[in-house]
Amino acid sequence: MIAGGGTGGHLFPGLALAEEFKRRDSDAEVIFVGTEHGLEAKIIPREGYPIKFLRAEGIAGRSILMKIKAVRTLIHSLFDARRMMRAVSPDIVIGVGGYASGAIVFVAHMKSIATMIHEQNSVPGITNRILGKFVKGICVTFQESLTFFPLSRTYLVGNPIRLKIFKGEREPVSRLFALDKDKFTVLIFGGSSGARSINRAMVNALNHMPDLKDKIQFLHQTGDMDYEDVRESYRKAGAKGTVAPFIYQMAEAYAMADIVVSRAGATTVAELIALGKPAILVPYPHAVGRHQEFNALKLKELGAAFMIPDNELRGETLAGYIRELYENESARMDMRRASSVLGKPDADKKIVDIAMSLIKKDEDIKRKVKH
């Protein structure tokens, strides 16, 4: 059972783990747990996995009244989790972050079911900090996270990436997105819900690149809120490309991209460095513990990406970086080489190895108790 979600940063590593469990044993049953209002409600059914929903809401960064409501919902989620445990009786429950993972991992622990968590960011969120006090295994992406958890149960493994991310091919993909397979392509996305500051800056950047209008095309995920406005702005600017509220086929989108403009969430960063994609990163300024800023700084310092702080993001600046990467092939090659130093493509295998060892230990303990 894989629990968590809310955003792609939590959800997609869970999908990578599901793929690895199924690759090892096609008969393995993987069930996801999330909330009806999280991204998982859309994505998991499309990926072919069953999903169960519980009631849960975030607490951090909310008003007193909303926190009280969230605590009340948490009590409901514990009852939901108990019902799920009775119905499924999983061999292991893995929390991948987000408030949807808290109750289910806690109840699994109370029922002596093997439990573990994966932390994608350098600074753990409140749910994983609490769960880390009692789960049997803790897997982290960044070395900086080690100080937040008991070292005896914590493993530095990286961030798992879906195998399909590596399998996109440019020629058929160009037809999928109605793009020219031979034209330089800029992929823009601001996370699963879009990013207004990136959308606005990109629209303004078009005004600073009129000479590149016939040389560059764009694939832009806007989120639902800005979709119509951004699409109309591209049309007025005469820019070539495809604008969509959400891109479900991210493997194909990456395959099409020559460069990427995005936020700096842990999962996005892991995918970028695994694929060696030159990137312009705009960290989300309100991320817990400024973890997106640290992610982007790490890539910038190693020469794997450009970074623009959100409060300094302007269309002219963004256009300048896009122009530089378009015109300078050696700069793109340098970023690809720097990315190869950072990538950890076997994180999914390491995490599933740890999960299988926890299941075996759990089974051994139960056998001894019976005898």
Image: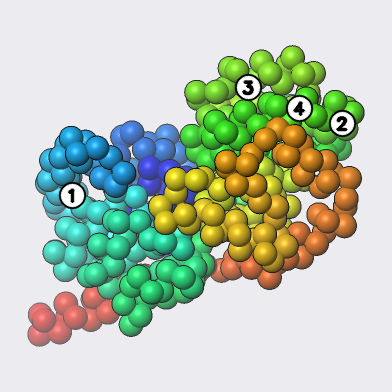
Of the 4 image quadrants, the one containing the N terminus is bottom left
Residue 186 position in % (x across, y down): 74, 38
- In the figure, residue 339 lies in which quadrant? bottom right
Q: Which residue is mark 2?
A: 212
105 in relation to 134, above or below: above
112 in relation to 254, above or below: below
Q: Which residue is mark 4?
A: 206
Q: Residue flagged by tag 4: what amino acid is it? A: Leu
Q: CA distance from mark 1 to mark 3?
A: 41 Å
Give the residue drawn at x 63%, y 22%: 230
Q: Which residue is mark 3?
A: 230
Q: Residue flagged by tag 1: what amino acid is it? A: Ala
What secondary structure is found at the residue carrying circle 1? helix
Q: CA distance from mark 2 to mark 1?
A: 54 Å
Q: Residue flagged by tag 3: what amino acid is it? A: Val
Q: Which residue is mark 1?
A: 81
Q: Residue flagged by tag 2: what amino acid is it? A: Leu
What secondary structure is found at the residue carrying circle 3? helix
Q: Residues within 10 Å of mark 1 (few under 14, many from 20)?
A: many
Labels 4 and 3 touching (C-beta < 8 A) = no
Give the residue drawn at x 64%, y 68%: 342
